[in-house]
Image (cartoon, grey):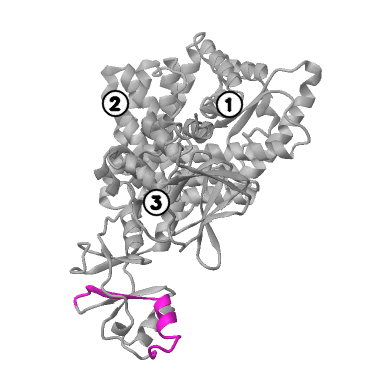
Amino acid sequence: MKNSIAERVQDFISGYPPFNLLSTKYLKQISSEITIMYLEKGDTIFKKDEPSHDYFYVVRDGAINLYYDNGNVNEFMNINDAGDAFGLQPLMVKAPYTLTATANEESIVYAIPIAVFQSVTENNAKIQKYLITSFASNTYAPYTAEQAGQIFVDYLPNTSQDIVNFQSANYTKNPITCDITSSLKDAAKKMSSHKIGCIIVVDGDKKPVGIITDSDIKHKIATGEFPIETSVNNIMNAPVTTGRKNLTVADGQLKMIKNNIGHLCITKDGTVNSKVVGVLSHHDILVTLGNNPTVILKEIKRCKRTKKLRAARLRAKGLLRSYIEQNIPISHIINVISEINDATTVRAIELAIKKMPTPPPVAFSWLALGSQGRQEQLLFTDQDNALIFEDVPEAKYAETQAYFLELSRLVTSTLNKVGFEYCEADMMASNPEWCKSITNWKTQFKNWILKPDEKAILLSSIFFDYNSVYGNPDLVDQLTDTIYKTLKETNLFFKFLGSDAVKSPSPLGFFRQFLVEQNGEQKELFNIKSRAIMPLVDAARLLVLSKQIKGVNNTSKRFEKLAELEPENKELHESCSYAFKALSKFKTKQGLLHNNPGKFIDLEILTKEEKLKLRRCFKPIHEIQEVLKIRFDLKNFL
């Protein structure tokens, strides 16, 4: 007789990793042994410090929250949705749980027997790699394989050797230490004055010989076991567990769990035989794991209040900083932050719709413009957006537009509270000029193209870089088709765009000196956005429009596509793509350093190497501008 419940379980788990890597035979074997758990909101599956279970778990319906319970506050770590596996620790090591798992809502969870699972997967290298990666990075991606490959590449290594390199641990450098001859009283005073929870005990050569934590003082001194004047070597934990300077999150987390400790000493060579250079805490690990794309995206999608949405988006800033410090490829950083920005906008729209008295009267599409439209917005900048709604009878137009203007006002207000400033030029969907029907939008773009002037070109630099973030994509497709059809009717528009693209000359002066601002608050600062980044953005836009290239909005990807289509200019286009990414990284570093959009750079704080690298980015700017002058015959037009 068939086990219909087991068959339903098998059908479900076969669609999710790591079960989708198993044969039908093994899936059937596992499915027949699972236990089904029915949970009410708030029910706990396991708690921090609880002995590990004989099962790991998969969410069937509902959602499971993971928290780190530090005794006072539950620090949120992740939300597990349908298909997500969690509680994987017992598969790696038999040690108490480090997190608490509770039901976020009414949920159904499958408990998978570890013994059964391991018996059918012990020789499957792909599954072992997935489990180690998921456990170490706390990543359970709710995306397709294609999306995951684009967004989470540094969380999904290609070989088991790559696992040790996929994410660097962010440890505290130059830790506070005390000599082995010190008294505990002196060590405790040091800890208090520096407001730290542990101190490393070192010998005369600065090699770590022990570690003392707040917990040690509480359990060994406050209880009267030792007097406060005792020597540190009487209560320190020894020998210490050490790690190397390029320690990964995976390695650090596994070492802490195996040794049941909360701190690792980082030394020059990774052993106790070299000088201590840092300390990695369990909290450092949790912060790193919490700041990963999947956790942030899931949190954004579940936010019900603007305050929570802002907090989630701000965590992306920490992720951005970590990526920049770890020298993750900028193209990957752009992919991740763009995904987070779009998810933030989508959630803002969903929350706004809930606040409206009625659902949208007709289909609509929300467009991100400018840098977000090009999917290259890394730092908080001002908003540029627009809204297209479906055509309605003329008698209904004013009423329909009024609805979407109010909706847009709610959305832009939420985005402002999240951290995206209002556009000073009011190029937002809450402006009636940029919130209209598809027919009116088609007319608008036709006028810009067929009757170009300075204002039209200024607006084109923003509105021709758009990305549909939410709503009916057919409306955007219609608009795109109209734009490219109209572009075939004229060459004058390209001349205007070309003239605008070459108006900012090379950022270097006659004597190869950087052209800096001459007056105002930004005097002596270099405007990396207007003098270096925007000339490349403008050139890429013009070239893809002239070649009728649809669906490629990102500047570096535009140049990469042009390199593919123009083999004779392949080297130049690839140089432009590289220069754009390098300049974007410079700008982002400055923005993070000064907590601003990073538009202006103080050249005096750059190293000689950084200045040389910046200069190298300027050569392709000059060369691509010369190509534009020739290709669009701008000599007599400027």
Looking at the picture, how far across and down is residue 321, in whole percent? 41, 51
Q: Nearer the viewer, mark 2 or mark 1?
A: 2
Query: Mark 3 vs mark 2: which is more N-terminal?
Result: 3
Give the answer, above or below, for where 389 lies relative to 179.
Answer: above
**Is residue 219 found inside the magenta-colored segment of the image?**
yes
Give the label on residue 31, or none: none
- Quadrant where the C terminus sits is top left
Residues 249 and 502: in front is: 249
**Structural distance between the alpha carbons of marks 2 and 1:** 31 Å
Which percent across, then down, holds residue 362? 71, 23
Alpha carbons under labels 3 and 1: distance apart: 40 Å
Q: Is residue 600 magenta?
A: no
**Which residue is identified by label 1?**
455
Residue for point 39% across, 45% down: 134
The residue lying at 35 percent from left, 21 percent from top is: 562
- Amino acid type of the residue tagged 3 in the rendering: Ser
Of tags 3 and 2, which is closer to the observer? 3
Disc on res. 572 = 2
Q: Residue furthest top?
A: 489
- Secondary structure under tag 3 reads helix
Q: Which residues are magenta?
A: 205-228
Residue holding disc 3: 322
Look at the picture and state if 64 lies above or below 564.
below
Q: What's the residue at 32%, 26% (across, down)? A: 573
The amino acid type of the residue labelled 2 equals: Leu
- Which of the pair 590/56 is nearer the observer? 56
Q: Earlier in the sequence, mark 3 or mark 1?
A: 3
